[in-house]
Amino acid sequence: MAVQAAEIPQNTTSAVDLGPAVALSCRECGERFPLGPVFACESCFGPLEVAYELPSGDGEELRRTIEAGPTNIWRYAPLLPVPADVASHPNTNPGLTQLVKADRLAKELGVTGGLYVKDDSGNPTHSFKDRVVAIAVEAARAFGFTTLSCSSTGNLAGAVGAAAARAGFRSCVFIPHDLEQGKVVMAAVYGGDLVGIEGTYDDVNRFCSELIGDPLGEGWGFVNVNLRPYYGEGSKTLAYEICEQLGWEIPDQIVIPVASGSQLTKIDKGLKELIRLGLVADKPYKIFGAQAEGCSPVSTAYKAGHDGVRPQKPKTIAKSRAIGNPADGPYVLDIARRTGGAVEDVDDEQVVDAIKLLARTEGICAETAGGVTVGVTRKLIENGQLDPALTTVVLNTGDGLKTLDAVAPTTGPTATIRPDLDAFRAAGLAGCAPSPSHSPLPRCPRKATP
């Protein structure tokens, strides 16, 4: 895990063009370093994140600039570690996914203050990982890498494979050997190398950290290791989009699935940036983290009142949440407590029930991570921790078609009949048409994607 100068490609300099990004800053001690493919502080080994010189001046003018921008995450390029001409580069161009006003789900859960689902299954490879990879690709270009890589629980592998194919990089990604078949096939179809590692995600991640320090990894950009400071910034775009789609307002409550915890911490960072830039009004908001009971190190630490996170061995159907040693776990605890939120977990049965609930009420087929988030939202309401009278946004980070195994045992045809009307009547299915009250619900405004 040591950071060595030899790991940095020869054309890396502090003057590299990544737009408003000016340095890397340690989240623990505050020491600054030149922009480069490093992820840990040389002084205290704390995690590094991107520091900026963000636009100053009239917030209203910046809003107009953003709204006139591309119909993807590059509308927020002035707030991201990417060059100004990023929209002209070959990339998968994710973002601007639907914010669904979930009135039927709200009724089921007893939410009266407005409930929305940020549905990131609409991204190019059907998960939020396209956002973070798109940013990492631009850093990889700037630092002269030739191969894109990652350790992945599934969605990231597919996002890296697609982005590498689009941008002309070689890809070689590493996954646990027992992932859902849908995610394995999707990661492999883009033509890069896909390597299964015997063990858990944490074993895969340790292997990748070793490869970075070996000559075998020369010229490789690991999007969630040596490019992690840049990669993580892609999650800020979820905060930007949610607020823009709500009319430039921060929701009162946000429920976010937690694996490594990076998505949650960067959404909080994005909200704070929007306030500082005058793009939204400053107001209190609560952030809640959602975990699967079979891999809930952050939830366990939160409930015990601990500041640190004790690693766990994952055992859950929500394999995209199966990170037993989450890098950003302590920061998730800090944010949940600072904002008045919480971190909660649900078991596998509750995950499946929540997947079906979201599908039945809103027509959104979520992967298991979405089931975790909706299930935790329901539990938080029942426990009195989440206020149903406040505006709430829950995240669905991936497409349920990738995790059909989770619901397949309890989901199938209502009946199998002969092809005649008598058989249909005998099955008791006549008169099952939905009532007129089941009319389509309005969705939040979204500019059409060409």
Image (cartoon, helix red, strand yellow):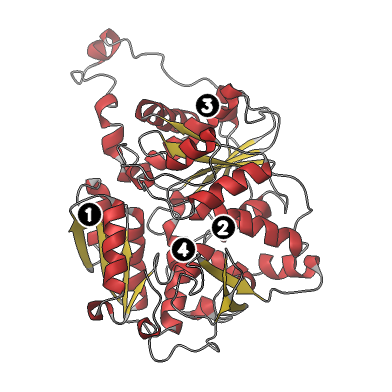
The CA distance from mark 2 to mark 4 is 11 Å
Q: Earlier in the sequence, mark 3 or mark 1?
A: 1
Q: Nearer the viewer, mark 2 or mark 4?
A: 2
Asked whether residue 268 appears in the rendered view, the answer is yes
The CA distance from mark 3 to mark 1 is 34 Å
The CA distance from mark 2 to mark 3 is 24 Å
Q: Nearer the viewer, mark 2 or mark 1?
A: 2
Query: Where 189 falls versus 393 (above or below)?
Result: below
Mark sitting on residue 132: 4
Q: Which residue is mark 1?
A: 185
Q: Which amino acid, mark 4?
A: Val
Whole-percent x and y of residue 187? 27, 59
Q: Which residue is mark 2?
A: 266
Q: Which amino acid, mark 1?
A: Val
- Quadrant location of residue 441? top right
The CA distance from mark 4 to mark 3 is 29 Å
Q: Nearer the viewer, mark 4 or mark 3?
A: 3
Q: Earlier in the sequence, mark 4 or mark 3?
A: 4
Q: Is residue 77 left or right of residue 91?
A: right
Q: Earlier in the sequence, mark 2 or mark 1?
A: 1
Q: Is residue 271 left or right of residue 410?
A: right
